[in-house]
């Protein structure tokens, strides 16, 4: 449904080359860009651009206002990029071929932006579940790798207990074990971080459930 609204915006503004929608954390959830581009990196930098301007306002002791920013325009000779605030955590970015009465043309897509904003709340709820699943999959993969490292360590220990083993090999085994222990420590730390991340996402989902039920 969101993608249909993107196409309507493009039809309303023929000058638009590409459109993307992203959350404040840089996650892009809809875009007309092909996957051959570094979409995550693009989202990260778009979110950073908005945050940089917020920081400028804070440094200069300027008030953002209750609604945060409304739009951010970056204009060059042949291109114009407009980032528009949608919902509390969502943003829309439009890439234009050239600047031509942008403010007037933006009025023609206001109704589509309003509809997109309504849909974003639904999409974001679904995105939370996707993020949770990805997080849980990452934990499984990390635990699998950790188990493989433990198995490697056990095999090295068994080999080191053999009577016919050379002194050089013993030194090599000890070095390998030390490396494996370091790798295990890194994996355990990453598992712990991912588990905390999963708990935060679960709390967000539960909070949204409570809010929707009230």
Image (cartoon, rainbow, N blue to C red):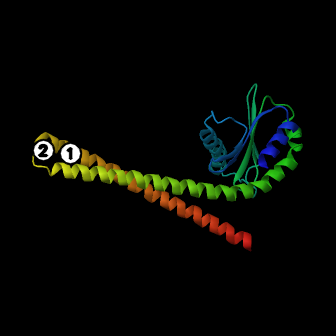
Q: Check the picture and name the quadrant holding the C terminus.
A: bottom right
Q: Position of residue 207 (x, y in %)?
A: 65, 68
* Mark positioned earlier in the residue sequence (2 or 1): 2
Instruction: Name above or below for residue 109 compared with residue 115.
Output: above
Q: Is residue 65 visible?
A: no
Q: Secondary structure at mark 1?
A: helix
The residue lying toward the viewer, choosing from 155 and 33, is 155
In this rendering, would 160 be left or right of 136? left
* In this picture, residue 145 sits left or right of residue 108: left
- Circle 1: is it few (<14), some (14-19), or many (20+) Cα within 10 Å? some
Residue 205 against residue 37 in the figure, above or below: below
Q: Nearer the viewer, mark 2 or mark 1?
A: 2
Residue appearing at x 73%, y 28% in the figure: 76
Residue 173: image tag: 1
**Regarding mark 2 in the picture, which secondary structure is present there?**
loop
Q: Could you say which is closer to the camera, residue 12 or residue 142?
A: 142
Label at residue 3: none
Q: Position of residue 155 (x, y in %)?
A: 25, 50
Image-quadrant location for residue 132: bottom right
In this rendering, is residue 211 above or below 115?
Answer: below
Camera-nearest residue between 27 and 167: 167
Which mark is drawn over residue 165?
A: 2
Q: Residue placed farthest to the top in the image?
A: 77
Residue 72: x and y, percent?
A: 74, 42
**Which of the 4 image quadrants contains residue 201?**
bottom right
Does the residue at mark 2 contact the one at mark 1 (Cβ under 8 Å)? yes
Tell me the CA gap for discs 2 and 1: 10 Å
Residue under the point 75% across and 29% down: 79
Where does the image place residue 42, in percent across and percent down from the top left? 63, 39
State whether residue 17 appears in this view.
Answer: yes
Q: Dot 2: within a 10 Å radius of its alpha carbon, few (fewer than 14), some, or many (20 or more) residues? A: few
């Amino acid at each position: 449904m969101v993608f249909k609204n993107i196409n309507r915006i493009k039809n309303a503004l023929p000058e638009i080359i590409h459109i993307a929608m992203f959350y404040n954390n840089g996650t892009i959830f809809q875009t007309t860009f092909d996957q051959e581009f570094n979409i995550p990196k693009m989202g990260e930098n778009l979110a950073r651009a908005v945050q940089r301007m917020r920081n400028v306002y804070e440094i200069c002791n300027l008030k953002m206002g209750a609604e945060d920013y409304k739009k951010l325009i970056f204009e060059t000779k042949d291109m114009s990029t407009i980032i528009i605030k949608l919902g509390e955590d969502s943003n829309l970015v439009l890439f234009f071929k050239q600047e031509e009465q942008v403010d007037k043309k933006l009025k023609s897509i206001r109704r589509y932006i309003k509809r997109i904003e309504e849909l974003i709340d639904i999409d974001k709820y679904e995105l939370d579940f996707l993020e949770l699943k990805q997080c849980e999959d990452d934990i499984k993969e990390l635990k699998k790798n950790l188990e493989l490292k433990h198995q490697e360590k056990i095999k090295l220990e068994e080999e080191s207990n053999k009577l016919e083993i050379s002194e050089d090999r013993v030194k090599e085994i000890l070095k390998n074990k030390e490396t494996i222990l370091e790798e295990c420590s890194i994996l355990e730390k990453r598992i712990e971080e991912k588990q905390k991340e999963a708990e935060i996402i679960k709390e967000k989902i539960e909070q949204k459930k409570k809010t929707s039920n009230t």
